[in-house]
């Protein structure tokens, strides 16, 4: 692991626990937007008072963040940095084509 160029997701996510943490990391990043929107829509559809809806949305968001940080702790700094760099390259290349 002396050279950064030979690091990839397959070699770093080498255990079943790390593979599960990788999937969890991706899903909780999506969940940062989906959980509050979904719970807000649920509260609206069920005619909950605004304060109760906001409380449920806040609790859902906090639970999502705790799971996210747990997956980051399992993955480790190297793997999280690699994922971030790949995502930055993905979004940079899309924005340049527009």
Image: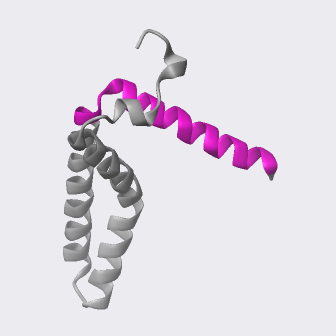
Q: Quadrant of residue 17?
A: top left
Q: How is the image coloured?
A: one colour
Queried whether the magenta region covers residue 81, the answer comes back as yes
User: Which residue is drawn at the image coordinates 48% and 36% (left, top)?
Assistant: 84
**Is 81 above or below relative to 90?**
above
User: Which residue is drawn at the image coordinates 25% and 90% (left, top)?
Assistant: 46
**Furthest residue toward right:** 98
Viewer-closest of 51 and 85: 85
Q: Quadrant of residue 50?
A: bottom left
Queried whether the magenta region covers residue 23, the answer comes back as no
Residue 90 x, y percent position in the rendering:
62, 44
Viewer-closest of 56 and 27: 27
Q: Quadrant of the N terminus?
A: top left
Please give left or right for residue 92 compared with residue 20 in the image.
right
Please give left or right for residue 78 compared with residue 42 in the image.
right
Viewer-closest of 45 and 4: 4
Please give left or right for residue 58 compared with residue 79 in the image.
left
Magenta-colored span = 73-97
Please give left or right for residue 88 compared with residue 47 in the image.
right
Residue 55 x, y percent position in the rendering:
20, 67
Which is the main secondary structure of the residues drawn in magenta? helix
Residue 42 x, y percent position in the rendering:
29, 82
User: Which residue is drawn at the image coordinates 63% and 37% (left, top)?
Assistant: 89
User: Which residue is drawn at the image coordinates 33% and 44% (left, top)?
Assistant: 22
Viewer-closest of 21 and 33: 21
**Furthest residue toward top:** 2
Q: Quadrant of residue 80?
A: top left
Report the number of discs. 0
């Amino acid at each position: 692991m002396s050279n950064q160029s030979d690091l990839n997701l397959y070699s770093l996510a080498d255990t079943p626990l790390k593979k599960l943490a990788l999937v969890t990391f991706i899903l909780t990043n999506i969940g940062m937007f989906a959980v509050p929107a979904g719970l807000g829509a649920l509260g609206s559809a069920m005619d909950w008072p605004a304060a109760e809806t906001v409380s449920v949305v806040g609790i859902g968001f906090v639970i999502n963040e705790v799971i996210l940080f747990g997956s980051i702790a399992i993955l480790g700094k190297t793997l999280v940095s690699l994922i971030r760099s790949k995502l930055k390259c993905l979004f940079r290349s899309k924005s340049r084509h527009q």
